[in-house]
Image: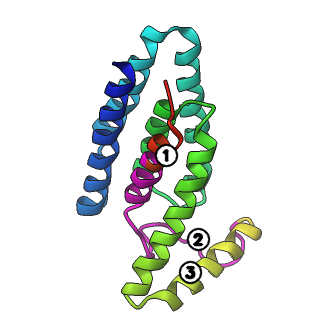
Amino acid sequence: MTQAAASVLLVVFVCTAAWWDATASRIPNGLTLTGLAAALILRAPLGLEPLLHGLGGSGIAFGLALVFYALRAIGGGDVKLLAGVGAFLGSGEVLGALGLIAVLGAAYALLTVSLRGLLPLLVFNTLDLIKSWLTLGRAGPVRKLESPNALTIPYGVPIAAGALIWWFGEGVRL
């Protein structure tokens, strides 16, 4: 029963977050905190070890996402969504899922900007971002997600897709 409940809750959690991100360009804190809490509540009756794996998965996802947030590559809602996904997946599965999410996010970004005719701008912005990272922000203006000409995508969509592919494709178990 716990696995079925976790599967249903994960699907509802990430699909709702993806919908919010795609339609409103934000993911509400209430949703991300509820998803994180649901994952940990489902793990708690299974004992200390599964609960610690959930906390570990959440911490790993949060820590890695925070790096990308600090680099201004993703938004705060994405960070919290990834922490919730990490709690569902646990410490043993989260790194593989994050890798898949990154690949899907890159593909989604390329598809989105290509369809909008903005591929040259994406290349320019990416090179500018890399230059800023390599010089620790000393080369040129710091780009933010709110900057003019910033190309943004609803990253909640590839997060949801990657989490669900990993969850159902790998047979993740609480």
Give the labeled residue for mark 1.
169
Amino acid at dot 1: Gly
* 162 and 109: which is toward the camera: 162
Question: Magenta stretch containing residue 136, yes or no?
Answer: no
Our reading of the magenta stretch's main secondary structure is: loop
Distance, label 1 to label 3, CA atoms, is: 34 Å
Q: In the image, residue 143 lies at what x, y percent?
A: 54, 71
Q: Nearer the viewer, mark 1 or mark 3?
A: 1
The label on residue 35 is: none
Give the labeled residue for mark 3.
125
Q: In the image, residue 73 lies at what x, y percent?
A: 54, 62
Amino acid at dot 2: Val
Residue at 62% over, 50% down: 67
Distance, label 3 to label 2, CA atoms, is: 11 Å
Residue at 40% over, 77% down: 112
Q: In the image, residue 39 lies at what x, y percent?
A: 41, 26
**Image-quadrant location for residue 41:** top left
Q: Which residues are magenta?
A: 137-164
Q: Nearer the viewer, mark 2 or mark 1?
A: 1
| Mark 2 or mark 1: whose residue is earlier in sequence | 2
Amino acid at dot 3: Asn
Give the labeled residue for mark 2.
142
Q: Is residue 152 above or below residue 56?
A: below
